[in-house]
């Protein structure tokens, strides 16, 4: 039974259909994962095959797709209805304007789970406008009595502006006192406002995140009069997992030693009333092994199948802004992009800043 009313010829150019068919055949009829590039008419003109799987699954290498691309995979049984996992990936990629198609092995039919939106043009940053804020007499100088003009800070600003405008990676090393935070926050926030896109700043420590939220971002708002929303999001392990809490309540926490039971009970009581579910909301520091019993962990998260999915503290932003969040601090891959080691968590947005410790190399 086929679950589609769409013919691939309405979505994919004939030569590309043949390439996809050949790639599926080469993979023995198993699932393959591809990224397709579209022309101005939103027809897929070429595909790159990134992964091969088995009859029911294939690795989804989502970071290979950019805004305006489409991810494509095949369902060998010819039933093109998307699975829950397909829908989750399609929702995530769709929010970045990446389409998602499922085809059958003959590539005759397609199920366009998410289509690419046409004509999304990014508004570029203007370096002269942004650098004016850093000049003597600019916004920072007028509002901060201690402010000093620093040439390296403006040079760093230029690199960040270019990276945004050209969608490139910038790797910048700058010494203490350069004013790095403002040199990337100003273009990051300006980009986000102009283009209505999220920008993520990932730091090596929570302390640095707190410094950005409590000090640098308020300064930016005051000095530059920018209106934007910022949210502090910590790594997954900082949040309680409600499914684990429920399990521990049912089985009594069999792995917890007797001496730690009191603390476990305190954590269970806290979990029932916490507002953000983060470790920082506790009024005591839990022992690591006791916290582990209820902490959110990527490899134990059942995601869409979880009965607490809609209330999950990790998956929902603290301000209930109804946006799923998918990130944590990652190691860097050789090309400098974030490299997730935790399932499909990863950031897809134009700006992604990672601050590294000085001894990172
Ligand atoms: S969605 Fe995952 S992290 Fe959230 S409560 Fe469920 S299992 Fe835990």
Image: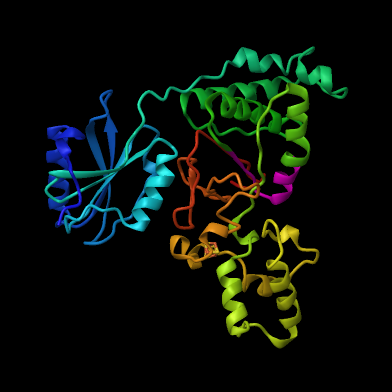
In the image, residue 25 sits, relative to residue 181, either above or below, namely below
The N terminus - image quarter? bottom left
Instruction: Please determine whether, in this image, residue 247 is positioned above or below residue 315.
Output: below
Res. 70 image quadrant: top left
Coloring scheme used: rainbow
Which residue is drawn at the image coordinates 21% and 34% (left, top)?
Answer: 11
**Residue at the outermost bottom position:** 258
Q: Is residue 176 visible?
A: no
Q: Return the residue found at the far right.
A: 145
The picture places residue 267, in percent across and down from the top left corner, at 71, 71
Left or right position of 80 against 223: left
Residue 98 place in picture, x, y as percent: 37, 38
- Residue 7: give x, y in percent of width and height: 15, 39
Residue 346 in percent (x, y) is at 49, 48
Q: Quadrant of residue 36?
A: top left
Is residue 301 shown in magenta? no
Q: Is residue 339 above or below residue 142?
A: below
Give the answer, above or below, for where 204 lies relative to 156. Answer: below
What residue range appears in magenta?
200-211
Q: Looking at this view, is 30 or 267 the one in front? A: 267
| Label tally | 0
- The answer, for residue 291, to whether it is visible in the render is yes
Residue at left offset 23%, top offset 55%:
31
């Amino acid at each position: 039974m086929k679950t589609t009313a769409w013919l691939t010829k309405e979505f994919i150019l004939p030569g590309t259909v043949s390439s996809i068919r050949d790639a599926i055949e080469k993979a023995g009829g198993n699932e393959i994962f591809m990224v397709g590039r579209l022309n101005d008419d939103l027809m897929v003109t070429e595909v790159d095959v990134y992964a091969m799987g088995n009859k029911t699954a294939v690795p989804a290498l989502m970071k290979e797709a950019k805004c305006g691309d489409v991810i494509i995979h095949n369902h060998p049984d010819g039933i093109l209805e998307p699975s829950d996992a397909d829908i989750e990936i399609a929702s995530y990629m769709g929010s970045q304007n990446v389409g998602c198609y499922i085809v059958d092995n003959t590539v005759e039919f397609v199920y366009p789970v998410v289509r690419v939106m046409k004509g999304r043009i990014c508004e570029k940053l203007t370096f002269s406008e942004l650098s004016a804020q850093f000049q003597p007499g600019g916004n920072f100088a007028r509002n901060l009595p201690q402010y000093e003009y620093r040439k390296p800070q403006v040079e760093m600003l230029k690199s960040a502006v270019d990276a945004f405008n050209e969608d490139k990676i910038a790797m910048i090393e700058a010494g203490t006192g350069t004013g790095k935070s403002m040199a990337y926050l100003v273009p990051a926030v300006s980009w986000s406002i102009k283009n209505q896109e999220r920008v993520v700043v990932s730091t090596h420590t929570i302390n640095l995140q707190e410094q950005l939220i409590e000090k640098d971002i308020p300064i930016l708002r005051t000095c530059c009069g920018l209106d934007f929303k910022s949210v502090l999001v910590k790594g997954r392990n900082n949040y309680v997992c409600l499914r684990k809490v429920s399990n521990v309540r049912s089985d009594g926490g069999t792995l917890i030693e007797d001496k730690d039971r009191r603390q476990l009970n305190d954590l269970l009581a806290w979990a029932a009333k916490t507002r953000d579910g983060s470790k920082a909301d506790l009024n005591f520091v839990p022992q690591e092994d006791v916290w582990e019993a209820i902490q959110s962990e990527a490899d134990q998260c059942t995601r869409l199948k979880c009965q607490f999915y809609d209330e999950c503290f990790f998956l929902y932003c603290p301000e209930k802004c109804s946006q799923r969040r998918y990130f944590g601090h990652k190691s860097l891959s050789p090309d400098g992009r974030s490299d997730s080691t935790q399932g499909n968590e990863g950031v897809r947005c134009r700006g992604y800043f990672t601050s590294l410790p000085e001894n990172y190399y």
